[in-house]
Structures are given as C-alpha cells and as structure tokens.
Image: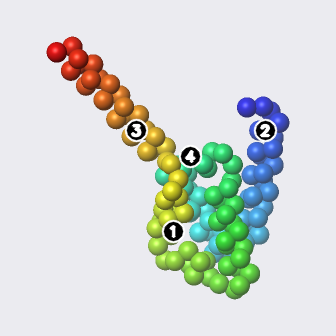
C-alpha cells in the first residue's frame, strides 16, 4: 500500500465521519452501534473502504430528511438489520472456518494415505 493510498483513505474516513456527525443524535447513536457490530462481525469488504458504512449513512440521511426516527429506518432489531445488510458478504469468520476445514482435510488425508 502506498502512502498516497493511506492519505486518501484517511480523507475518505474523515469525510464519512463528518457526514455521521451531521446526523440527528439518535441516528448517530445507532450508527455507532452498527459500526461496532460490523467491525466485530467482520465483513471483509469493510477493510476496502467505507462502501457499506456509506450506504448506511445515505439511508440515514434520507430517513432523517423525511423526519423519520432512526428505528423507523432500521427496525427495532438493529442487529438483524446489520445481518441483513451483510448477508451476501463474506466475513473473516467464514474465511477462517474454510481455512480450518482445509487444514483438517489435508491432515486427515495425509494420515489416511500413510495407513494405506
């Protein structure tokens, strides 16, 4: 990664967070919880920029402009809202599970081949 890429990433993140700070307070609180949740669950595409998070801000800006409360936008189960957003995204947990399964398969195959 080039230094220029890092600088651009920081600029993009600052601009993104400025949009979040411009939202009504209830939206900011829910956004921060969604962000924490997504960082823990670990969709891979979060490391490639702010696309998922920007989409959430877009949705929140639209909801706020229509005078809706944040839970009218997300529904009362915010974790389910997040899961639905990333249902087609690969997570780090899935990548790790695949890696473990491959290692187990290789080890078992190696052991099986030796006993033949």
Q: Nearer the viewer, residue 88 or 51?
A: 88
**Which residue is under mark 1?**
81
| 64 sits left or right of 71 in the view | right
**Which residue is under mark 4?**
44
Name which of mark 4 and mark 2 comes first in the sequence: 2
Tell me if label 3 and label 4 are in contact, CB under 8 Å: no
Quick one: label 2, few (<14), some, or many (20+) residues within 10 Å?
few
Quick one: label 4, few (<14), some, or many (20+) residues within 10 Å?
some
x, y (%) of residue 107?
A: 29, 23
| 44 sits left or right of 3 in the view | left
- Give the spatial CA distance, label 4 vs label 2: 18 Å
Name which of mark 3 and mark 4 comes first in the sequence: 4
Q: Please determine whether, in this image, residue 74 is positioned above or below residue 11.
A: below
Q: What residue is at 68 percent from the left and 56 percent from the top?
A: 51
- Image disc number at residue 20: none
Q: Please determine whether, in this image, residue 2 is positioned above or below residue 37.
A: above
Q: What residue is at 51 percent from the left and 68 percent from the top?
A: 81
Quadrant of the image containing the C terminus: top left
Q: Nearer the viewer, residue 94 or 65?
A: 94
Tell me if label 4 and label 2 are in contact, CB under 8 Å: no
**Which residue is under mark 2?**
5
- Give the spatial CA distance, label 1 vs label 4: 18 Å
| 96 sits left or right of 62 in the view | left
**Which residue is under mark 3?**
98
Asked which secondary structure carries label 2, the reply is: helix
Q: Nearer the viewer, mark 3 or mark 2?
A: 3
Q: Please determine whether, in this image, residue 103 is positioned above or below residue 34.
A: above
Tell me if label 3 and label 2 are in contact, CB under 8 Å: no
């Amino acid at each position: 990664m080039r230094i220029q890429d890092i600088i651009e990433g920081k600029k993009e993140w600052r601009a993104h967070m400025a949009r979040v700070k411009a939202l009504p307070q209830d939206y900011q609180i829910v956004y921060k919880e969604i962000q924490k949740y997504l960082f823990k669950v670990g969709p891979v595409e979060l490391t490639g920029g702010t696309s998922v998070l920007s989409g959430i801000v877009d949705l929140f800006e639209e909801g706020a402009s229509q005078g809706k409360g944040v839970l009218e936008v997300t529904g009362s189960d915010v974790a389910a809202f997040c899961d639905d957003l990333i249902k087609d995204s690969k997570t780090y947990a899935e990548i790790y599970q695949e890696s473990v399964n491959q290692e187990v398969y290789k080890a078992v195959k190696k052991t099986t081949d030796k006993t033949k």
